[in-house]
Amino acid sequence: MASPKFGFSLLAFLSISLPAYADAPAALDFNVAQQSPPRRVIPLNSNAPIAQGTQITLNGISFGGNWMQWQGNRIGLSDAIVRSQFGADLLSTQDAARQPIQWFSEAVLPTRLAPPLRYLDITDLAQKHGWQVQISGNALQISTPNANLTRIQQDQIESNTDRITLSFDRPITWQADPQSNELVLTLDAQADQNRIQAFKPSPAVRIRSLKIEPNANRTTIRLGVPIGLRPRITTLSNPNRIVIEVGSNFLSDKDILWANGLLWRQKSLTVRANQFPIVWLEVNPRQPGLSIRPILPNATTLVGTLPLLTTAQQSQASAAINGGYFNRNNQLPLGAIKVDNRFASGAILNRGAVGWDAAGNWRFDRLTLQETLALPGGQRYPITVLNSAYVQAGIARYTSDWGSTYTTLTDNEILLPVQNGQAGTQQTVATAGTAIPLPTTGYLLVFRSNRTAAGFFAPSTPIQLESAFNPADLAALPNIIGGGPLLIRNAQIVLDGRLEQFSTAFIQETAARSAIGQTSDGRILIVTAQNNTVGLGPSLSDMAEIMQQLGAVNALNLDGGSSTTLYLGGQILDRPPRTSARVHNGIGIFFQP
């Protein structure tokens, strides 16, 4: 069935004057008239920067961003800033020292890895295009020459895809901000009143409205687009153009060796009749100087959630993906988390988990923990969970790995400290949300809806704790993240959501998804799959097939939906940052400085 047609509304604020551009001071000017012959692309060497900062001003607009200066007045920006604030697209490369970009025309920028970020040397690019650059304390000020929007063109390239083409008299810096129901494009260019009036929009399939807002040397384009539909934006030269396509696949294929041992890849994959945009990282866990660790929002407590971008930046990770499940209300984990040999949160419900060590040994399987309390009289009581926010009737156990305190999760819990293998004094806490100190040695037993059993644990009663993990070799690894369901094991799809006690609704859901996998040669795949152009996300079985197509012989599904987030070098790769939900934990990739 044909998509409904939507008319355009054209809004242009034309009474604002367009003053001449004020050049910034030229302490580090790169002027076209003084342009030297093209320089050979040389990787930035390992000498320390002579200046660096976290603030950038571009044509009078300030924002947070990382920059560095090296000897010879070489200036580098993080690749996240080159993409988000300048409008450059990073192109495929198998050379970690050279990053090709598409910014109206192609250029190759030298790179420098300064963990947790990677910097692109913009010195020659700035000189070629007449940018003026000045360092002022923590801030890097960049000014680009005046530019003009010379043409606006609209057409339909497919039955369900609209295209807007913006032409300019020179390359410009620009920023895209995808919002819930519109794309906001900010252009560092003046819009001529006559050209705006000459543009006559016609009915469109996907684009619901178009507004042009001139403002001094900057122009804002607002495109109304359906919720969840991501436009594809590219730049071209001769003439200089920004091309916006709405309705087509937004994803461009990439194979970028971001650093030795870390490859950023993206492409669309077809599963049965559906095509999904896939963005993933391939990681060599045995690469010297590279390590992989669980990351948490807080260093001192398991309580709390943050956007993955914030957690990754706090932990100084170069790359990260969201991890396992959690309770959004109390912001506590619902699955295994083991960090540096400490079970901060225990396994639940026979769900899938992945474990690894610093030597590059990885294990994917379903993980269970069976614990029993044995009393002198022969009574034996099973423990339901260890260090978990998963609440059920029975006896739960909490250790100092959970934190310095335990906060009651339900009303009328009976709390019993155990130290040196003996029961302490019980107390009943009437209301949920009460914080109780955890023993630094021993553990705390929490009786929920099991008051009869609590009566057998009198003070000074000897208690023998019996614990058994299955599989033991997975549980013994120093780092573990739980998720589920397990997708692939030993090259076979083993998906069984019911076995891992997921709900029918969850099993049948189609949504954005995250997963982690391992190839036959030991590479680790960190994968996200987003909704396609018709708003359909992959099912669990789709995700298993996607992981197989990527070469996984072992794979685990992670938390998904709005939690699905892939981070690299200061940027979110797979979705607009504002659409990324707060998450409890993740898996981080680190490089030694």
Image: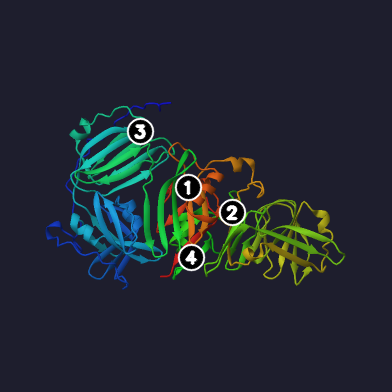
- Residue topped by disc 4: 285
Asked whether the residues under the numbered discs 2 and 1 touch, taking CB atoms below 8 Å apart as contact, a structural biologist would say: no
Q: Nearer the viewer, residue 4 or 410?
A: 4
Three-letter code, disc 2: Gly
Marks 3 and 4, Cα distance to the nearest angstrom?
A: 44 Å
N-terminal-most mark, 2 or 3:
3
Looking at the rendered structure, the secondary structure element under dot 3 is loop
Disc ID at residue 529:
1
Asked whether the residues under the numbered discs 1 and 4 touch, taking CB atoms below 8 Å apart as contact, a structural biologist would say: no
Q: Residues within 10 Å of mark 2 (few under 14, many from 20)?
A: many
Q: Which colour style is shown?
A: rainbow
Looking at the rendered structure, the secondary structure element under dot 2 is loop
- Circle 3 or circle 4, nearest the eye: 4
Disc ID at residue 207:
3
Q: Residues within 10 Å of mark 4 (few under 14, many from 20)?
A: many
N-terminal-most mark, 4 or 2:
4
